[in-house]
């Protein structure tokens, strides 16, 4: 394990906010939440916030969420608005959807005031299979390149084509890394997940070779089970791009730092982690299904949502207990079992990050893979 301080020390947390969440590509939401021109949404990223906009040409933009006048947030983080311009709520400076300053009350014709110099600060943004990632550092390089190997695994699921039809927000009293480590192993499954063990053998599957920016593996479904649900049946439709193997397995991958992507034969579940403090994390969980499934008269996403809601709560309960356990002044780092090899890969990635190697940097990726 990492040292206990990595999970509870506010100084470590601040460092991670700046260097992990604000220092590279972090997921800030879903393309499905910004589909029309004028859609705007603000999200927190690391130490600051980001304003996302969809412009008239349907191009997505990301701006540092502060007004160029005196710094007011353009939109409170977590809120959405639909408007054809960006209007600061403080003194009404107004920007176009692509960030240019359109109007600044009282400045018209003012000597020395060049409105082209006062546009919003734009950040690199990318839509990857329906997920929106922002590079808060502006210098992290290509996320597409960093995810090239994962791309091959994800393409058959076409997550960008699926419709989100289930969404839960959880507030867990646990460090974001404890939640992620828990996702990376099923060593705990026989103890806390009776429902999961009924449909998927906890010792099945393997992990993928490490690539540097993502960690993950796959697990089998038990014979006769169609998907992860309480009785193993699916009320959805198998995803059209999957082969025989895809229909019998579930893939679990973590894109550093804050996405847990779970690819099922008939739906895609996504957890997006937003840490609030060393011991508190907001988890947004979504379930997305094929459009054909939604057309079925008996379609009800509950079969997937209920199963994972039960499992999620079992997981968060365990993670909260780990957080409390590690708060002991006597806590020391423990050893990882062979069944926790993905946890090892993950903590190695984090530790290399602490040492200053960017997980998004190709050179560092090769070092991790080696
Ligand atoms: S701070 Fe935005 S208009 Fe003044
Ligand atoms: Fe679990």
Image (tube, grey):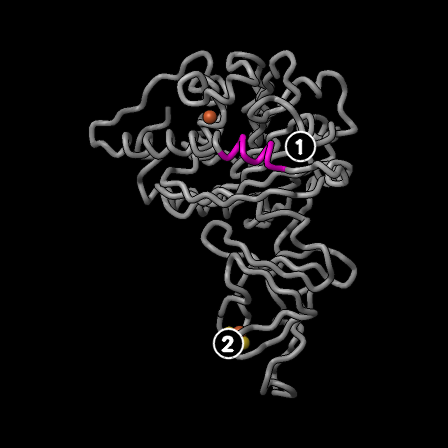
Q: Residue at x 69, y 29 (%)?
A: 266
Left or right? Give the position of 193 relative to 6: right
Between tags 2 and 1, which lies in front?
A: 1
Rendered position, 355 above or below 94: above
Residue 354 covered by magenta stretch: no
Instruction: Please give the range of residues in magenta.
Output: 301-309
Sequence-earlier tag: 2 or 1 = 2
Residue 182 in the image: above or below residue 198: below
Q: Nearer the viewer, residue 162 or 215?
A: 162
Closest to the observer: 211 or 331? 331
Which of the 4 image quadrants contains residue 131? top right
The secondary structure type at the circle numbered 1 is strand
Q: Which mark is residue 90?
A: 2
The number of numbered discs placed on residues in the rendered structure image is 2
Tell me which residue sits at (61%, 64%) in the image. 81
Q: Quadrant of residue 271?
A: top right
Q: Is residue 178 left or right of residue 231?
A: left
Distance from Cα at disc 2 to Cα at disc 1: 43 Å
Q: Is mark 2 within 8 Å of ligand 1?
A: yes
Query: Where in the figure is residue 130, as x and y percent of width and height?
Result: 68, 43
**Residue at label 1?**
267
Residue 192 visible here: yes
Can residue 69 be seen here? no
Which quarter of the rendered picture does the C terminus lie within? Answer: top right
Q: Tell me the tag on residue 169.
A: none
């Amino acid at each position: 394990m990492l040292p206990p301080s990595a999970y509870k020390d506010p100084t470590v947390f601040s460092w991670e906010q700046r260097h992990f969440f604000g220092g590279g590509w972090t997921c800030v939401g879903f393309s499905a939440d910004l589909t029309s021109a004028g859609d705007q949404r603000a999200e927190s990223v690391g130490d600051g916030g980001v304003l996302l906009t969809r412009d008239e040409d349907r191009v997505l933009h990301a701006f540092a969420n502060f007004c160029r006048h005196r710094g007011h947030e353009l939109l409170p983080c977590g809120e959405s608005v639909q408007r054809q311009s960006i209007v600061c709520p403080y003194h009404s400076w107004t920007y176009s959807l692509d960030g240019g300053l359109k109007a600044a009350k009282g400045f018209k014709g003012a000597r020395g005031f060049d409105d082209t110099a006062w546009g919003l600060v734009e950040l690199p943004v990318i839509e990857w299979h329906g997920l929106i990632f922002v590079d808060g550092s502006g210098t992290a390089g290509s996320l597409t390149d960093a995810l090239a190997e994962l791309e091959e695994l994800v393409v058959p699921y076409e997550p960008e084509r699926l419709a989100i039809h289930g969404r839960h927000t959880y507030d867990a009293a646990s460090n974001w890394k404890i939640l992620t480590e828990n996702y990376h192993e099923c060593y705990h499954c026989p103890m806390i997940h009776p429902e999961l063990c009924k449909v998927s053998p906890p010792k099945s599957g393997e992990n993928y070779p490490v690539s540097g920016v993502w960690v993950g593996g796959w697990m089998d479904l038990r014979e006769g089970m169609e998907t992860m649900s309480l009785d193993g049946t699916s009320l959805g439709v198998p995803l059209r791009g999957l082969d025989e193997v895809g229909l019998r397995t579930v893939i679990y991958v973590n894109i550093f730092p804050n996405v847990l992507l779970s690819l099922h034969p008939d739906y895609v579940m996504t957890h997006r982690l937003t840490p609030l403090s060393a011991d508190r994390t907001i988890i947004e969980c979504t379930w997305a299904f094929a459009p054909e499934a939604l057309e079925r008269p008996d379609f009800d996403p509950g079969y997937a949502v209920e199963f994972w809601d039960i499992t999620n709560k079992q997981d968060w309960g365990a993670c909260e207990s780990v957080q409390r356990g590690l708060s002991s002044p006597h806590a020391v780092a423990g050893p990882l079992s062979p069944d926790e090899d993905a946890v090892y890969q993950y903590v190695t990635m984090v530790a290399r990050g602490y040492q200053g190697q960017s997980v998004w940097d190709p050179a560092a990726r090769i070092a991790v893979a080696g």
